[in-house]
Image (cartoon, coloured by chain):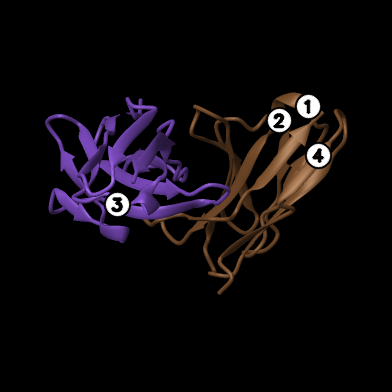
Amino acid sequence: NAGVTQTPKFQVLKTGQSMTLQCAQDMNHEYMSWYRQDPGMGLRLIHYSVGAGITDQGEVPNGYNVSRSTTEDFPLRLLSAAPSQTSVYFCASKLAIGGEQFFGPGTRLTVL
Amino acid sequence: AQSVAQPEDQVNVAEGNPLTVKCTYSVSGNPYLFWYVQYPNRGLQFLLKYITGDNLVKGSYGFEAEFNKSQTSFHLKKPSALVSDSALYFCAVRDWGLMDSNYQLIWGAGTKLIIKP
């Protein structure tokens, strides 16, 4: 199993540009989520999904959209990039509510 | 409201010495508690969790954590530190009594552990 994969690993955007961060898992996990990691702030949940066709907002959803058309994929879209979105983004998946999360390697995004 | 605190930004330990990384939490009901480790330029990896049962939980890489309900703490420990243990450690909590579909964990800010040879 590849686990949780994310692409790209690095990305530089200009303010106002849009892009999609890709996330895929091959463990047949129902739960998937997107976090951003900023220094001294731990992880903050952006959006999450409890199954295909079901998504919901986390703690910091503004400026981001998600969709979950399949169990495997959970892309994160930045609609109009802003410097405040400069961060490291992690995708994670888990099998059940009390289970451990599996994290992807992260995408380091810089918005100029 | 749920919350978790890691009071130390950084912990420095000499190799071979015991280490402790502190975590305290606040939930209304009973907690799910987790520890994750993040090595440089990598994603987070699961170390251990407490849901119920024995207060001493053993996890990966020789780490263990003790759940203390009266002190609302879940400190991470290892008897003998290795240089390779140097990483960023995160504590996370969820109130398992919450009846909602949001399985969100509340994450601490992280503690940088530095093991010196």
Amino acid type of disc 2?
Gln
Q: Quadrant of the N terminus of chain A?
A: bottom right
Amino acid type of disc 1?
Ala
Q: CA distance from mark 1 to mark 4?
A: 11 Å
Marks 1 and 2 in Cβ contact (< 8 Å): yes
Q: Earlier in the sequence, mark 1 or mark 4?
A: 4
Q: Please give the count of numbered marks on the rendered protein.
A: 4
Mark 4 residue element: strand
Chain identity for the colour purple used in the image: B
Mark 3 residue element: strand
Q: CA distance from mark 3 to mark 4?
A: 36 Å
Marks 2 and 3 in Cβ contact (< 8 Å): no
Q: Residues within 10 Å of mark 1 (few under 14, many from 20)?
A: some
In front of the other: A96 or A109: A109
Q: Residues within 10 Å of mark 2 (few under 14, many from 20)?
A: some
Query: Do we see residue B86 in this rendering?
Result: yes
Which residue lies under the disc numbered 4? A12
Which residue lies under the disc numbered 3? B49
Tell me which chain the residue with mark 3 is part of.
B
Mark 2 residue element: helix
Query: Do we see residue B30 in this rendering?
Result: no
Left or right, residue A102 beside residue A57: left
In front of the other: A20 or B59: B59
The residue shown at (28%, 47%) is: B15
Question: Do dots 4 and 2 share one subunit?
Answer: yes
Q: Residue A67 at x, y = what percent?
A: 70, 50
Kindly identify which numbered label has been placed on residue A85: 2
Amino acid type of disc 3?
Lys
Tell me which chain the residue with mark 4 is part of.
A
